[in-house]
């Protein structure tokens, strides 16, 4: 599909809002008198984008009369020197800024006071009990509030409105401490907000808010509140557990405490200090909640600095806690010189007979080793590949000393004293570990399971990660309602689509595997896979590359063999990560690539090499999503795959006015061509992507931007009627993944009276599609 817009909404959306930041929260006086005449202004996002494009920002610190904060001024000057987003930043004392100049450009207000606001409403005001926010929350002195890129209240109506960001607190120095702890070295993140507001309370509670619509009003129903824990739900001699954002489930609590006690007992045989350690554990009810609090969504996270282990028990599979390096690291001394993750896997390998699930991890590691996949340490972004590389290394080292005894005592008794002493020396730092990967390839039978091609048609939908605020994306709690709504369309298959990024299609670079909360990180992707599998659906994992600068995957191509080799090395590293994830989550199929036209047409042998390696670690079905036209019609290695994948945006007609019969003829034309390819190569045909916007005349160029075309749901439905009628006539067609369905309901309608997007949800096209799916077998 030759367009960057649909992917752009799926990866690192730059809201282009931010224009300042404010620390402090105790304001002086705010007049709430409404304007006497309503003057039309640009939409909120337009104002925010314009402000973000400004070359100059002003940081204005405002403190109550007689108060000073050297820490605040030092922080602002430090940020200004760093020039986030290459902005020129001027740091000013509120007292030196004329009131009539506050509204002339993007501004950030920091402190415990707000300059006088006239003639407009503002969500912060002073009352008898102190400062209140949004007419509902009374602020405590040490609370701090962030309102990013809000309408500048000093901008006069009708005069080029701009934005103001507010960091407000009654205890400015405490707020500065919090900001430094959260953002030091990453000041850009202060000006890249995911929320309409953030309220951080002194007791540890956190409130996050959204806008209600396209205006500047906040939505009360969409506010997310994270609640801190006061008392531990479990307190033993060595472990103290706190439950955040809800009560703990006793069965889960018993499982994690027994698991941690076991790791402690085992680790103590080589790490005596583990017996003297006490650890704090914080449990969360979901990935969403740990992601909102921690900025990452991994279900097991060890905070080495604070010595706190963070867990999502409900997401852990049996034995997973024992197999995580993080849970073993909790018992290690901070001064251990050995790579702690590697040491954890050495210990796990040593005690493998006592760890349920270790056999499967060993098979995964051996499968990876059988591919010859031995990157240098630190040269791969994949946490899964790093884990298995270290497990391969640990297995080789432990096997060298034949340490599979189960305990030091048994090792000594059975004459393996040398090996046990070696491992003790490793822990003590007396042995310099050789981190060179073994080069021999084990001859193993992999993968661990094999999926059969489904007999029934795959009535699929592409599940789009539309939420970058954690709670509304792949790992959020809202995915269940969104997937449940697909039952009405008789859906039985789902494509889950994590993205990576390339800035320049002509420059081979490492493809990042993003893990930040809010992105399509591994935990969030796995969460959506598991939810779909729970419903009994077929899952297609479909990783894709998003290109910047108006490019699309079909532009990826290189002039020299050296660059081609570099690209495929990076690509192999990236796709192997998702092959391992697909195997671990037992996704039914993996799409190896999407619309990389030049790569498949010019370098088929490189693709065949990737296919051979992936099959060693993944037992599901493999396909590739070829772009309509040149790539699909010139593709040469379908027989190496299990299904023929077509991203079909073939035009159904080229004229503005067209009959339903002509639309059907257009759909039949390309469907017949695709079926010939399917029969020629003996593989089932899957439409790995297909869809139409709800705009006027979507049949002419289905992949294109909406542009200036008006919303037209009936035209979209007409295209779907033609598509589904032709599909019903095509025997070789065994799967269809419609583009697209949002990860949370109401995404496209939010604040809009019309929707010109691809989703059929809530439109006549949904009825057409549902009727077809209901009867397609």
Image (spheres, rainbow, N blue to C red):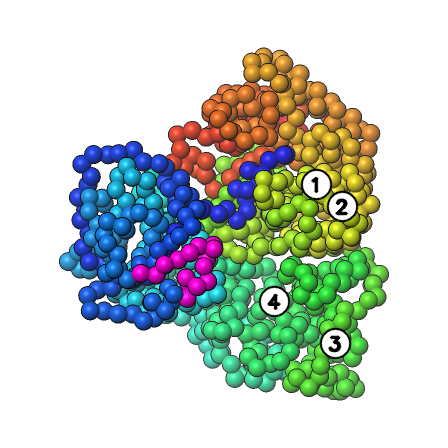
Q: Nearer the viewer, mark 3 or mark 2?
A: 2
* Residue 190 seen in this snapshot: yes
Q: Distance between the residues labelled 1 and 4?
A: 36 Å
Question: Which residue is disc 4 drawn over?
Answer: 324
Q: Distance between the residues labelled 1 and 2?
A: 16 Å
Q: Over which residues does the magenta segment extend?
A: 78-92
The quarter of the rendered structure image containing the N terminus is top right
Q: Could you say which quadrant of the image residue 49 lies in?
A: top left
Q: How far apart are marks 3 and 4 (CA)?
A: 22 Å
Residue positioned 33% across, 53% down in the render: 107
Q: Could you tell which of marks 1 and 4 lies nearer the N-terminus?
A: 4
**Element type at marker 4?**
loop
Up-down: is 705 above or below 397?
above
State the image coordinates of residue 406 (x, y, percent, origin top left). 70, 78
Residue positioned 64% across, 78% down in the render: 338
Residue positioned 41% across, 37% down in the render: 750
Q: Which of marks 1 and 4 is in front?
A: 1
Label disc, if present, on residue 434 of the rendered structure: 3
State the image coordinates of residue 690 (x, y, percent, origin top left). 62, 31
The quarter of the rendered structure image containing the C terminus is top right
Q: Distance between the residues labelled 3 and 1?
A: 39 Å
Q: How far apart are marks 4 and 2 (CA)?
A: 43 Å
Q: Could you tell which of marks 4 and 2 lies nearer the N-terminus?
A: 4
Q: Which of marks 3 and 1 is in front?
A: 1
Question: Which residue is disc 2 drawn over?
Answer: 559
**Element type at marker 3?**
loop
């Amino acid at each position: 599909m030759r367009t960057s817009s649909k992917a752009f909404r799926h990866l690192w959306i730059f809201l282009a809002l931010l224009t300042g930041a404010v620390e402090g929260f105790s304001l002086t006086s705010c007049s709430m008198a409404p304007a006497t005449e309503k003057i039309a202004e640009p939409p909120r996002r337009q104002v925010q984008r314009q402000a973000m494009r400004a070359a100059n920002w002003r940081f204005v610190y405002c403190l109550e009369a007689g108060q000073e904060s050297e820490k605040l001024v030092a922080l602002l000057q430090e940020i200004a020197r760093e020039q986030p987003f290459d902005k020129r930043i001027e740091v000013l004392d509120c007292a030196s800024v004329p009131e009539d100049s506050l509204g002339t450009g993007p501004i950030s207000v920091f402190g415990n006071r707000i300059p006088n606001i006239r003639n407009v409403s503002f969500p912060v005001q002073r009352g008898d009990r102190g400062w209140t926010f949004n007419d509902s929350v009374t602020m405590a002195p040490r609370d701090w509030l962030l309102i990013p890129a809000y309408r500048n209240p000093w901008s006069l109506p009708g005069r080029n409105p701009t934005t103001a960001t507010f960091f407000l607190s009654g205890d400015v120095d405490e707020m500065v401490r919090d900001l430094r702890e959260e953002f030091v070295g990453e000041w850009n993140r202060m000006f890249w907000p995911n929320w309409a507001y953030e309220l951080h309370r002194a007791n540890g509670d956190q409130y996050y808010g959204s806008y209600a619509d396209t205006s500047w009003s906040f939505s009360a129903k969409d506010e997310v509140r994270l609640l801190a824990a006061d008392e531990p739900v479990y307190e033993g001699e060595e472990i103290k557990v706190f439950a955040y954002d809800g009560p703990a489930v006793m069965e889960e609590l018993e499982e994690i405490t027994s698991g941690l006690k076991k790791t402690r007992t085992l680790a103590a045989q080589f790490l005596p200090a583990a017996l003297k350690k006490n650890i704090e554990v914080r449990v969360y009810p979901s990935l969403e909640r740990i992601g909102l609090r921690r900025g990452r969504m991994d279900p097991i996270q060890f905070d080495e600095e604070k010595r706190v282990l963070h867990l999502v028990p409900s997401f852990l599979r049996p034995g997973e806690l024992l197999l995580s390096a993080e849970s073993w690291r909790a018992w290690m001394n901070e001064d251990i010189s050995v790579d702690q993750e590697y040491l954890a896997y050495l210990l796990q390998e040593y005690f493998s007979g006592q760890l349920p699930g270790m056999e499967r991890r060993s098979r995964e590691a051996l499968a990876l080793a059988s591919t010859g996949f031995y990157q240098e340490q630190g040269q791969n972004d994949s946490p899964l590949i790093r884990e298995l590389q270290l497990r391969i290394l640990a297995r080789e080292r432990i096997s060298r000393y034949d340490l599979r005894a189960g305990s030091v005592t048994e090792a000594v008794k059975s004459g393996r004293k040398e090996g046990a002493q070696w491992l003790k020396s490793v822990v003590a730092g007396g042995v310099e570990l050789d981190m060179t990967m073994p080069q021999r390839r084990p001859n193993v039978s992999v993968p661990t399971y094999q999926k059969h091609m489904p007999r029934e048609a795959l009535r699929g939908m592409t599940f789009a990660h539309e939420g970058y605020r954690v709670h509304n994306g792949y790992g959020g709690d809202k995915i269940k309602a969104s997937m449940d709504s697909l039952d009405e369309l008789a859906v039985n298959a789902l494509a889950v689509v994590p993205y990576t990024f390339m800035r320049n299609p002509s420059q081979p670079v490492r493809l990042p595997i993003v893990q930040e909360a809010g992105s399509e990180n591994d935990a969030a992707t796995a969460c959506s896979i598991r939810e779909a599998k729970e419903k009994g659906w077929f899952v297609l994992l479909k990783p894709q590359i998003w290109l910047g600068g108006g490019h699309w995957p079909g532009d990826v191509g290189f002039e020299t063999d050296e660059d081609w080799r570099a690209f495929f090395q990076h690509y192999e590293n990236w796709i192997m990560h998702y092959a391992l994830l697909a195997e671990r989550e037992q996704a039914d199929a993996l799409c190896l690539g999407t619309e990389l036209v030049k790569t498949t047409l010019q370098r088929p042998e490189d693709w065949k090499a990737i296919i051979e390696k992936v099959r060693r670690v993944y037992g599901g079905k493999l396909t590739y999503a070829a772009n309509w036209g040149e790539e699909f019609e010139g593709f040469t290695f379908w027989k190496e795959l299990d299904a023929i994948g077509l991203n079909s945006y073939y035009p159904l007609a080229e004229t503005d006015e067209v009959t339903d019969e002509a639309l059907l003829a257009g759909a039949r034309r390309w469907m017949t061509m695709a079926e010939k390819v399917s029969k020629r190569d003996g593989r089932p045909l899957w439409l790995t992507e297909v869809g139409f916007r709800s705009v006027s005349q979507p049949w002419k160029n289905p992949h294109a931007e909406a542009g200036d075309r008006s919303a037209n749901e009936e035209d979209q439905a007409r295209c779907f009627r033609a598509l589904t009628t032709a599909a019903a006539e095509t025997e070789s067609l065994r799967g269809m993944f419609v583009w697209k369905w949002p990860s949370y309901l109401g995404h496209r309608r939010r604040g809009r009276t019309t929707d010109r997007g691809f989703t059929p949800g809530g439109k006549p096209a949904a009825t057409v599609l549902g009727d077809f799916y209901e009867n397609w077998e």
